[in-house]
Image (tube, rainbow, N blue to C red):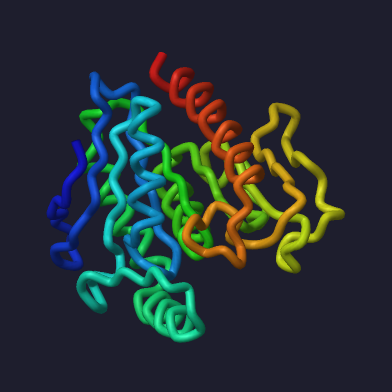
Amino acid sequence: MSHWITLVSTHGPMNGWSAEPDDKPVGGIVLVHEIFGVNANMRNIAERYAAEGYLTVVPALFDQVEREVELDDYAADDYLRGNTLAATLGVDTAAELVATAADAIGHAGEIAIVGYGWGGAVALAAARKMSLPCVVYYSVPTPVSPQDGTGPVLAHCGTLDPQCPSSRPASVDDGSAFVQIRLYTTGDGFDREGDPLHYHEESASQAFGHTVEFLGRHLRVRGH
């Protein structure tokens, strides 16, 4: 069952899309949206994680600036509006809101944070604060280590994306694959269904498979 919920934070209330598994959750995921808000694509992605057994919530971070933002056209105006909203909110405040969402689904078990685009930077910032596993789409994270409080990190990046040089190794780790980087022969936004200019079904499917494996491994370990 999926529905809108209200999350209460120190910055004020915000909406959240909650996607619930059919059976008892095997864990929880805070899904951090791109600059396009909690649009149809983000809700669909949440459903996919719920189908894998995870209670998934997508907090509407932009509610602190403008309520009910859903940008589905991926037109130039959407990018401009989304970037303006993201800059106004700021990564630090967004990370605090993500922490609120994580607390709200704590009853589901172990929690991970999964972020897309701008949401990837927010997810990583929140993961540092909360020492949680983190998955980042469309960017290579800045150097992180267990010493700075970050949990394990998986990053997905397209080799045709200028922000993700193909020369980057497939994994960067401290001897235990602490940070893994998965590369795909595509560009930015490859799991953005509904955006024909960027969506790449094969890469999206592969990345989702790697993400599910990562979540199962790290949340299971943390749960024990």
- Kindly identify the residue that appears in the image at 25 percent across and 28 percent down: 108
Which of the 4 image quarters holds residue 188? bottom right
Q: Is residue 206 left or right of residue 55?
A: right
Total marks drawn? 0
Which of the 4 image quarters holds residue 18? top left
Can you give x and y, in whole percent of width and height, for residue 109 in the image? Answer: 29, 26
Can you give x and y, in whole percent of width and height, for residue 24 in the image? Answer: 24, 19
- Kindly identify the residue that appears in the image at 21 percent across and 42 percent down: 2
**Quadrant housing the C terminus:** top left
Q: Is residue 60 left or right of residue 206?
A: left
Residue at the outermost top position: 224
Q: Is residue 167 left or right of residue 46?
A: right
Give the vertical position of 78 relative to 169 (above or below): below
Give the vertical position of 132 relative to 108 (above or below): below
- Kindly identify the residue that appears in the image at 18 percent across and 62 percent down: 14
- Kindly identify the residue that appears in the image at 71 percent across and 55 percent down: 158
Choose between 151 and 69: the one closer to the eye.
Answer: 69
**Quadrant housing the N terminus:** top left
Choose between 123 and 190: the one closer to the eye.
Answer: 190
Give the vertical position of 161 relative to 45 (above or below): below
Which of the 4 image quarters holds residue 213? top right
Choose between 74 and 127: the one closer to the eye.
Answer: 74
Can you give x and y, in whole percent of width and height, for residue 122 in the image? Answer: 45, 59
Residue at the outermost right position: 167
Q: Is residue 83 left or right of residue 189?
A: left
Can you give x and y, in whole percent of width and height, for residue 154 in the image? Answer: 60, 41
